[in-house]
Amino acid sequence: MRRAIEAIVATIAVPGTAVFLVPYLILVRTRQVSSGHVGVLEAFGLGIALVGAGMVMWVSYAFVTRGKGTPVPIDPPRRFVADGLFRYVRNPMYVGALLVLLGEALLFRSTWIVLYAAGLWLLLHTFLVLFEEPQLRRRFGGSYSIYVASTPRWIPHLPRPGRVTRATRK
C-alpha cells in the first residue's frame, strides 16, 4: 500500500508538474486563452493527451505491481519490467508525458508548449543516456542488454518475437 501511495504522489508531482502545471503557466504567461472552439485539431490533441496520460498512469501501476517499486528514484522497481507498454518502447512514461504535451500544444495551438516539449525531450534524452540507462545496465545486467537490443528508446514499434520474452524471464 505504501508503494502505491508513493507512486500516486510521484506521478502527480513529477509528470503532473511537467505536463500540466508548466504548460498552464506557459499559457498564462503567453496570454493564450482557449477560444472554446473545438475543431478536429483540438479533438485530436485531446485524444493524444489522454493516450499519453493513460501511458503515464499505466507505467506507475506497472512499477508498483510488476516491478515491486515506484517511479520515485529512491524506491525504484526491484524487478525488471519489460512487458506491457515496455514491449513497444523503453520509456513509455516519458513518451506518454511528451504525448500529453503534444496534445496540449494542439489543443491550445501553442508553439510555446511545442518548444517546451522539445526542451523537455532533450533533457530527458540526456538524463537517459548519461544516468538512467547505465544505472539500469548495472542493476539488471544481461536481461537489460537484451531488452535494449530489441526495444527502441523513443519511437514505439512492434516487438521482435522471442527477444523481449527472454529478457522478461531473467
Image (cartoon, rainbow, N blue to C red):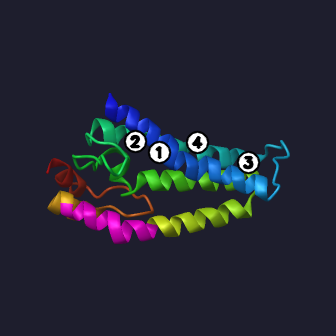
> Which residue is depicted at the point 58% across and 42% down?
50
Q: Is residue 147 left or right of residue 33?
A: left
Whole-Å distance between the Cαs marked 3 and 2? 27 Å
In depth, the one of 8 and 167 nearer the eye is 8
Residue 94 x %, y %: 46, 55
Q: Amino acid at mark 3?
A: Glu
Q: Which residue is mark 3?
A: 42
Residue 163 x %, y %: 22, 58
Q: Which residue is mark 4?
A: 50
Residue 23 x %, y %: 67, 53
Q: Is residue 163 left or right of residue 117?
A: left
The 10 Å Cα crowd at callout 4, few under 14, some 14 to 19, many 20 or more, is some
Q: Which residue is mark 1?
A: 56
Residue sitting farthest toward the front? 74
Span highlighted in magenta in the image: 125-138
Comparing marks 1 and 4, which lies closer to the viewer? Answer: 1
